[in-house]
Every structure is written in C-alpha cells, then in structure tokens.
Image (cartoon, helix red, strand yellow):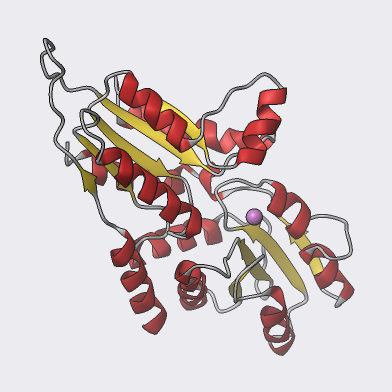
C-alpha cells in the first residue's frame, strides 16, 4: 500500500538516536540513574488533562521506581498554567534539570500522534542534549503513536470500537491535526486508508494539512450517509476538538456538516483516554528503554 510505504520512509528517516558517553565527574563514581520524560503539546483543560493522568498511571505501572517527569511543548499553555500557579517545564528545561540532577539514561516519550514538526524538534533537541560532554550517557526518544502499520491498525480498531450508539450506515470522521509544513502529514492519508479497510464509512480529515473536511463531504453524500460521528485523532480532546470539531461557531466541523444536512454527534474523547492506545505509546517507550 503506497500510503504505508510513504509512512515507513518518513518514520525511518526521523528515527535516529542520540548517544554520548558520560565521564564520571572528578571524585564521583559513575552510577546509573534512569528517568522518563513524558512530553506532550500540553493542555490547560482539566477535563482533557485526565488523559495525561491515565498515561502517567500506566507508565508508573510499567516502569516501577523509575523517575518520571512531564514537559509541555506549548509555550502558550505553559504560560497559562503558570498564571494558575502550576509550573510545567519545556522539554529543554526538563532535560537540563534531569542532567543537573545527575540522571544518566533518559527515555523521552512524545505523546504526539505523528512524527511531525513538533516531534522532529523534540528529537533534534534531545539529540543535542545527548552530545553534551559530562551529561547523559544515553538519551533516546521513543516513537510517537502512529509509527508503524501495526500501530495504525491497533489505534484504528480501538477508536472504531469506542463509538457508543453508532448504527449501520452512520459514518465517522476522525479529526487529525495535520500539518502543511512537514512530510509526516502523509501519515493521515495512510491512517485514512487503514480506517477505510476496516470500515468503509470511516474517514480521517485534518484541521490543517492536505486532507480537509471538504474532501470527505462528497464521499459522505455519495454513500447517502445521514449521520456522522466526529472523533478527535489527537491525544487529548483539547481546544481543536472542543472548538474546531464540536464548537457552535459556524466554521466548526459540527456546524459545517449540520448545515449540509447531516445529523452530527461529536465524541469528546482523546486517544490517550483509551488504555489500549496508551499501551501503544508505552510499547514505544519500552522499546527505547530496553537499550539502557
Ligand atoms: Co493546533
């Protein structure tokens, strides 16, 4: 399948490791101290943050006794949380802290859905931390959620099984984020194909990026669909899900589809709220951690 081949090229190109030998500081014995850094775009919504609680809970079960810290990539969200008295580090600040706290092996788990722009940035900076003298012995970045055909199939199956009340002939559109600036946008096309093979009226469209809602609407009409479920294909049901997907504004997906005569039912549940999907991320973390 062409889309899957594109994906594997994109993922392989991005999946590189940073490693550097650490030298014991003068008079100190070299000890091994392992840590996990969980990285997400972030959210300021307590409802959406439940997804991160689930990730943390399962990560603690999977890696007992290992230091676990969080970082948010979004400066806007960090600033908003800071006003509420909650300090969240950027990945770079969190890595600097881990380094000065003497951690030697760090596995970074990106809660991103695709290996896109934000993942790439995170990877690049983690790699640079790995090159610092006297710092980490090893730092590895685990793959994001949709990194193989198997991941895509698992995620698609779990999401399709969790649409309460859906009847035959009712369609689903999964809202991906999408990107116009990164080749990993192709992952959404691959994911659309995976959904289509499991369920011929399940589609992926993206807020940004090449596969828009406008591409899907004629397909719904052709299949004489009357009702459409909307589900985020994002780790949390945050701002995009609440506003761009399910909001009451005229330009939300819900409003656009309703205006075209479809019955619409949004489901505000992020993919990281499903334990089986969290486990796909954690498998990637285990794969990275197994190198320590
Ligand atoms: Co966005």
Report how many numbered discs are placed on residues in the image: 0
Q: Determine whether, in the image, residue 184 is placed left or right of residue 32.
A: right
Which residue is drawn at the image coordinates 52% and 29% (left, top)? 89
- Answer with the quarter of the image where residue 38 lies: top left
Query: Could you tell me which residue is drawn at 63 percent across and 67 percent down?
Result: 206
Horizontal side of residue 276 vs 126, given as left or right:
right
Above-or-below relation of 79 to 103: below
Quadrant of the image containing the C terminus: top left
Q: Is residue 46 visible?
A: no
29 vs 41, nearest the viewer: 29
Figure quadrant of the N terminus: bottom left
Viewer-closest of 18 and 144: 18
Q: Position of residue 113 (x, y in %)?
A: 48, 55
Furthest toward the top, the residue is 27
Q: Position of residue 260 (x, y in %)?
A: 85, 77
Is residue 59 shown above or below 30? below
Q: Using the rendered image of the protein, determine whether residue 181 is visible from the camera's viewpoint.
A: yes
Residue at x 38% of width, y 84% of height: 2
Residue 278 in the image, given as x and y percentages of width and height: 44, 44
**Figure quadrant, ligand 1:** bottom right
Q: Is residue 10 positioned above or below 98 on the image?
A: below
* Percent coordinates x, y for residue 50 in the rendering: 59, 33
Left or right of residue 48, residue 254 in this image:
right
């Amino acid at each position: 399948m062409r889309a899957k081949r594109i994906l594997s090229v994109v993922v392989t190109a991005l999946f590189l490791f940073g490693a550097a030998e650490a030298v014991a500081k003068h008079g100190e014995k070299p000890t091994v101290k392992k840590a996990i850094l969980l990285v997400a775009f972030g959210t300021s919504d307590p409802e959406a943050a439940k997804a991160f609680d689930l990730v943390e809970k399962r990560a603690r079960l999977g890696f007992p006794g290992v230091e676990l810290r969080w970082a948010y990539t979004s400066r806007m969200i960090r600033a908003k949380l800071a006003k509420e008295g909650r300090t969240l580090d950027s990945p770079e600040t969190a890595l600097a802290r881990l380094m000065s706290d003497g951690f030697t092996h760090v596995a970074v788990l990106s809660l991103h859905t695709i290996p896109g722009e934000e993942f790439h940035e995170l990877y690049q900076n983690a790699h640079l931390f790995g090159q610092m003298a006297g710092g980490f012995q090893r730092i590895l970045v685990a793959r994001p959620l949709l990194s193989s055909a198997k991941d895509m199939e698992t995620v698609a199956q779990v999401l399709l099984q969790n649409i309460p009340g859906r009847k035959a002939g009712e369609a689903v559109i999964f809202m991906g984020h999408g990107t116009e600036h990164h080749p990993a946008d192709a992952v959404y096309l691959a994911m659309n194909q995976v959904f289509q093979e499991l369920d011929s009226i399940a589609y992926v469209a993206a807020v940004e990026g090449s596969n828009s809602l406008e591409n899907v609407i004629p397909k719904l009409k052709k299949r004489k669909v009357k009702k459409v479920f909307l589900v985020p294909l994002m780790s949390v049901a945050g701002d995009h899900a609440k506003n761009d997907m399910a909001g009451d504004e005229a330009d939300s997906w819900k409003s656009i589809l309703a205006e075209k005569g479809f019955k619409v039912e949004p489901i505000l549940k992020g993919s990281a709220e499903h334990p089986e999907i969290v486990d796909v991320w954690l498998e990637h973390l285990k794969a990275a951690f197994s190198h320590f």
